[in-house]
Amino acid sequence: MYEDDELGSLRGMIEFPCGCKARALIYEGSKGQFSVQCPICGKYTRFDSGTMSAVTVRPVRGAVRKLNLRKPPSR
């Protein structure tokens, strides 16, 4: 479901550095970094929403498993 003011809160778009025509949308108030796999070629990209830049990176293998091991067991 989309909000009516979704385009109004859009800060900009960052193109994937792999050369594909895919883009990531950056919204107002977003900060930090995130990694996404390119929907066209499959390469991984790390986006920085503060500087509006993108860098192609290698995938981090086993990251989810390592983060899950840090959490205390839930009861």
Image (cartoon, helix red, strand yellow):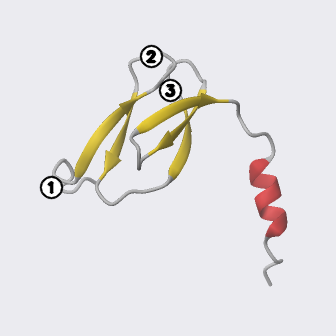
x, y percent for residue 28: 28, 55
Lower position in the chain sequence, tag 2 or tag 1: 1
Give the secondary structure at mark 2.
Answer: loop
Mark positioned earlier in the residue sequence (2 or 3): 2
Q: What element carries label 1?
A: loop
Tell me whether the residue at label 2 lies in contact with that at label 1, contact meaning CB atoms closer than 8 angstroms.
Answer: no
What residue is pinned by disc 3? 39
Q: Earlier in the sequence, mark 1 or mark 3?
A: 1
Quarter of the rendering occupied by the N terminus: bottom left
| 30 or 62: nearer the viewer | 30
**To which residue does mark 2 refer?**
20
User: Where is 39 relative to 64, above or below?
Assistant: above
Would you place residue 55 above or below residue 63 in this image? Answer: above
Asked where in the image residue 22 lies, by quadrant, the reply is top left
CA separation in Å, label 1 and label 3: 26 Å
As drawn, is 21 to the left or to the right of 6? right
Q: Which callout, 2 or 1, points to the residue nearer the camera? A: 2
Tell me if mark 2 has few (under 14), some (14-19) or many (20+) residues whose alpha carbon lies within 10 angstroms of its own: few
Q: Name the residue under label 1.
A: 4
Identify the mark at residue 47; answer none if there is no mark. Answer: none
Position of residue 38 in the picture relative to residue 29 (left or right): right
Type of the residue with mark 3:
Pro
Task: Name the residue rendered at 78%, 72% in the picture.
Answer: 71
Q: How many numbered discs?
A: 3
**Residue 5: horizontal and vertical position, in percent?**
16, 56
Percent position of residue 19, x then y: 46, 15
Outermost residue, top side? 19
Give 71 or 2, whichever is nearer the viewer.
71
Is the residue under label 3 in contact with that under label 2 (CB below 8 Å)?
no
Give 2 or 62, whichever is nearer the viewer.
62
Farthest bottom residue in view: 75
Q: Which amino acid does label 2 sit on?
A: Cys
